[in-house]
Image (cartoon, rainbow, N blue to C red):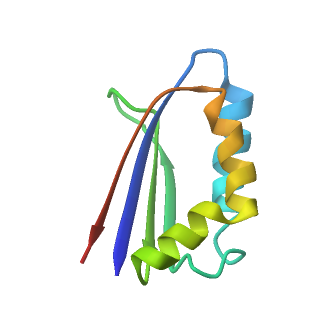
Amino acid sequence: MVKHIVLWKFKPGTEAERQRFLDGLRGLLGVIPQIKEQEVGVNTGAGNYDAALVSVFDSMEDLAAYQSDPRHVAVASICKAIREDRVAVDYEF
């Protein structure tokens, strides 16, 4: 099993695009079959990052298939224009 965790810091004034992006991510669960579990959350406290994605995949190959899936690529393209920073970690468990 692989856990894929991503954190984003968004540019100010991008709230509408941010919501569209996060809703788009949420909409991928049950659509892209490689996603076994997924949580998308918005930071409710003071911190460096605004939102997080935690996903679970059976293998690194399934993670790679998800990342190259056109439905994921379309959602991810929304984020590229509105993010200030992104960090990610993938680990097997």
What residue do we see at 65% from left, 15% from top? Answer: 13
Q: Residue at x 63, y 62 (%)?
A: 68
Residue that sits furthest to the top in the current view: 12
Image position, residue 30 (x, y; %): 68, 78
Q: Position of residue 76 (x, y in %)?
A: 65, 47
Is 59 above or below relative to 85?
A: below
From the viewer's perspective, is 23 left or right of 35?
right
Quarter where residue 45 is shown? top left
Between 69 and 25, the residue placed more toward the observer is 69
Relative to 47, 31 lies left or right: right
Using the image, determine if residue 17 lies above or below residue 41. above
- Residue 2 % position (x, y): 35, 74
Q: Residue at x 69, y 53 (%)?
A: 73
- For residue 26, what is the image quadrant? bottom right
Quarter of the image where the C terminus is located: bottom left
* 17 sits to left or right of 49: right
The answer to whether 77 is drawn above or below residue 53 in the figure is: above
The front one of 25 and 60 is 60
- Residue 22: image x %, image y %? 63, 47
Query: How many labels, in total?
Result: 0
* Quarter of the rendering occupied by the N terminus: bottom left
Among all residues in the image, which is located at the extreme left? Answer: 93
